[in-house]
């Protein structure tokens, strides 16, 4: 069950595009709580507003006043050909709730959401399907230079990331064309260098830098900088 979070929406909210859903089997079977049948008289969630980030989507909707409603089910899926199959991701067991935040999404992706109310024994018909696209990931840092200041030592320099939310950089290294492995963390957005004292002489290495925010959200990896250690 997802944890409900309160969010403060700005004064201006955009109502996202809505797709109509024809029949209940397009969003799967209603399984939350004790609702096992569809009651077409139960109110549906309408006029859903959204605020979108890179790894989260916030929703707001008008309060449900019908006393038969016990809570709201939330479904999510991705666009596909044919029927849209949405799976339940959360149940809000309080009809007075008017906000929900999905924090399990990926950057730069399109998702479909549906909201259904439920009572003690019945669930509402499928309502609207809300389409949202998350924001793109943070841009990669630019690696300015990789060189050897001394035998068996590699120094990596990059331009500090312009986003003020960045708090550190992850340094990754690979041997030849092998897998990337974590090497170190450099703290501080304005700290633009790392010195590798552990490469093996006679091998070729690749290095890359990944900026990271205080929320542990990663930017795109930098371009690979390669060097043969002597």
Image (cartoon, grey):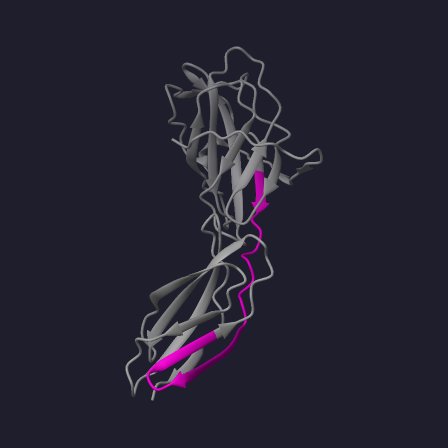
Residue 206 figure quarter: bottom left
Q: Is residue 96 visible?
A: yes
- Please identify the quadrant where the C terminus is shown: bottom left
Work out which residue is located at the far top of the displayed protein and give it.
Answer: 67
Q: Eyeballing the image, is 227 above or below 158? A: below
Q: Residue furthest right?
A: 12
Q: Residue at x 55, y 52 (%)?
A: 165
Residue 103 vs 169, above or below: the answer is above
Q: Residue at (47%, 29%) from the top-left corner?
A: 4
Q: In this image, 60 relative to 168: left or right?
A: right
How many numbered badges does the structure rendering display? 0
- Tell me residue 26's x, y (percent): 47, 37
**Residue 197 spot, x, y in % from top left:** 33, 75
Q: Quadrant of residue 138?
A: bottom right
Q: Is residue 145 magenta?
A: yes
215, 15: nearer the viewer: 215
Magenta-colored span: 130-156
């Amino acid at each position: 069950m997802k944890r409900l979070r309160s969010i403060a929406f700005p004064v201006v909210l955009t109502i996202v595009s809505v797709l109509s859903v024809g029949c209940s089997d397009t969003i799967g079977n209603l399984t939350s709580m004790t609702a096992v049948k569809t009651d077409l008289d139960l109110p549906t969630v309408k006029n859903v507003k959204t605020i979108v980030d890179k790894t989260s989507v916030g929703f707001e909707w008008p309060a449900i006043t019908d006393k038969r409603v016990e809570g709201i089910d939330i479904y999510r899926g991705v666009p596909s050909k044919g029927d849209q199959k949405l799976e339940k991701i959360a149940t809000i067991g309080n009809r007075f709730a008017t906000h929900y935040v999905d924090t399990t999404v990926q950057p730069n992706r399109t998702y479909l959401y549906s909201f259904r109310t439920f009572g003690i024994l019945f669930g509402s018909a499928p309502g609207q399907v809300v389409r949202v696209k998350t924001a793109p990931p943070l841009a990669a840092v630019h690696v300015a230079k990789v060189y050897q200041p001394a035998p068996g030592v590699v120094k990596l320099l990059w331009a500090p990331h312009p986003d003020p939310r960045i708090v550190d950089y992850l340094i990754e290294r690979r041997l030849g064309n092998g897998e990337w492995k974590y090497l170190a963390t450099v703290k501080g957005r304005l700290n633009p260098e790392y010195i590798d004292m552990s490469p093996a002489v006679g091998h070729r290495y690749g290095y890359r830098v990944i900026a990271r925010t205080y929320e542990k959200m990663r930017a795109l990896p930098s371009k690979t900088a390669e060097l043969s250690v002597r």
